Image (cartoon, rainbow, N blue to C red):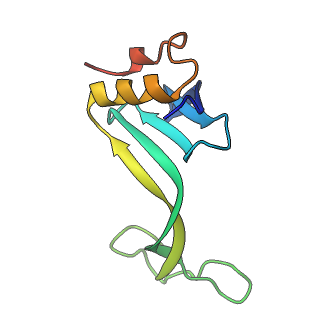
């Protein structure tokens, strides 16, 4: 893989982190997100797949249909299972694998101190 991404400073869950953003149309990913708390790099691919998701049930006006009381999951609206297109995700969890990946695909990997976020 060539250097088709750039590292940028970011926040994830109110924690300082980094992201990878594409800088070329050849890049196979939409973005990369490093979760400092979980110590995982999530890569979101351009490849789409169909998967089921629970979505709010909507009335004729496009508003969520409310329930009479909170459900077991704490939500106060009805949901329905729908098949939707979503981007394929990849999770890299080993610190050295994250470093190897970022070094190979980010054009500024050697000047951006992203390793400060990775516990080794």
Q: Is residue 110 above or below residue 10?
A: above
Front-most of residues 44 and 17: 44
Instruction: Give the residue at x 35% y 32%.
Output: 37
What residue sits 44% from the left and 79% below the top? 69
Q: Residue furthest front?
A: 1
| Residue 36 point in image, percent of width and height | 39, 29
Q: Position of residue 18 (x, y in %)?
A: 51, 27
For the view shown, which residue lies furthest in the top direction?
A: 111
Instruction: Name, please, the residue furthest toward the bottom.
Output: 60
Which quarter shows the C terminus? Answer: top left
Q: Nearer the viewer, residue 55 or 49?
A: 49
Q: Is residue 54 left or right of residue 57?
A: left
Residue 77 appearing in the image = no
Q: Position of residue 105 (x, y in %)?
A: 50, 30
Number of labels in the image equals 0
Which residue is rendered at x = 49% and y = 82% of the image?
A: 67
Q: Quadrant of residue 107?
A: top right
Q: Nearer the viewer, residue 74 or 100?
A: 100
Residue found at x 53% / y 75%: 84
Q: Quadrant of residue 56?
A: bottom right
Residue 14 locus on image (x, y percent): 51, 32
Residue 99 appears left or right of 47: left
**Residue 34 vs residue 25: left or right?**
left
Q: Where, by quadrant of the figure, is residue 92 drawn?
A: top left
Residue furthest to the right in view is 61
- Does residue 111 show up? yes
């Amino acid at each position: 893989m060539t250097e088709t991404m750039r590292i940028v400073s970011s926040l994830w869950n109110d924690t300082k982190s980094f992201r990878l953003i594409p800088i070329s149309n050849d890049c196979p990913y939409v973005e990369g997100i490093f979760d400092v708390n979980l110590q995982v790099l999530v890569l979101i691919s351009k490849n789409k797949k169909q998967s089921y998701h629970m979505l709010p049930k909507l009335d004729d006006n496009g508003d969520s249909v409310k329930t009479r009381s909170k459900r077991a999951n704490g939500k106060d609206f009805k949901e329905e299972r729908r098949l939707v297109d979503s981007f394929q995700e990849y999770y890299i969890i080993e610190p050295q694998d994250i470093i190897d990946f970022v070094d190979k695909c980010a054009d500024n990997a050697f000047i951006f101190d992203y390793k400060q976020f990775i516990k080794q």
